[in-house]
Image: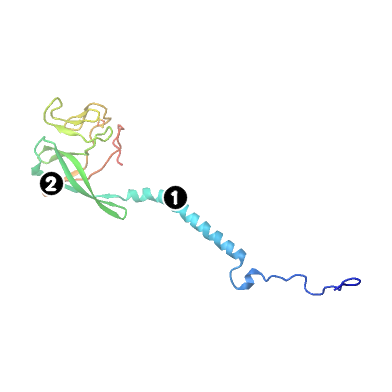
Amino acid sequence: MVWKGRPPRYEGPRWIERPPFEAKGGLGRRSFLKLALGAMGGVISVGVGVPIAGYFISPILRRKRVRSWAPLGGIDGFRFLEPKHVDFEERMKDAWITQEVTRAVWVVRKGEEDFRVYNPHCTHLGCAYGWHTSGPHKDHFVSPCHNGIYDIDGNVLGGPPPRPLDTLEWKIEKGELYAVYKDFQLGVPQKKEL
Ligand code: FES
């Protein structure tokens, strides 16, 4: 068809308006984005916040560690001035966790009801030491790692240990010896509980 003169003016709508996203009954695009961003923020906050909170809270929980008196055996099982290595199970309550850990101590009977109970680690770097009943270090505790030498009272006689053997609290109840096991910082002159 060939128009003569000006073509007739178009009177219909010039564009078809799209209904707004929200009008379709679902979430609006903007609301959806807001929600998604909010959710992502929440996940990131939890991911970062929980470890940080744990970092600050864990020392408080650690402080609640409860150590109990561990039975080491009847006192008649210990001879005077003959150090004895004793293994035992310690029941430890740390915050809400209770666990049994195998421990060891050295026990020295000094008198009828007088004892010394030592942590079994050398105060230098924590090696297990032993009581020598013969040889050049007879009647001494010897830490073989760097030749640390202690007397029966735990005093340092030689080698690099910076302080005497660490003593533990003990008590006698109904003829049984008990002790509270503890570990201490190694390599320093002061006895500092961990
Ligand atoms: S760990 Fe005992 S002397 Fe070094």
Instruction: Point out the tag, 2 or 1, that comes first from the N-terminus.
Output: 1
Q: Looking at numbered disc 1 in the image, what kind of residue is underneath it?
A: Ile
**How far across and down, in percent of the image, does residue 156 sit?**
22, 29
Compared with 22, 143 (above or below) is above
* Mark 2, residue position: 73
Residue 49 falls left or right of residue 148: right
Contact (Cβ within 8 Å) of mark 2 with mark 1: no
Q: Is mark 1 within 8 Å of ligand 1?
A: no
Residue drawn at x 77%, y 73% is: 13
- What secondary structure is found at the residue carrying circle 1? helix
Label 2, label 1: how far apart the Cα atoms are: 44 Å
Q: Looking at numbered disc 2 in the image, what kind of residue is underneath it?
A: Gly
Residue drawn at x 11%, y 41% is: 113
Q: Which of the two marks, 2 or 1, is nearer to us in this view?
A: 1
* Mark 1, residue position: 52
- What secondary structure is found at the residue carrying circle 2? strand
Find residue 136 and report its image quarter.
Answer: top left
Compared with 138, 85 (above or below) is below
The crowding category of the residue bearing disc 1, from other C-alpha atoms within 10 Å (few below 14, some 14 to 19, many at least 20), is few
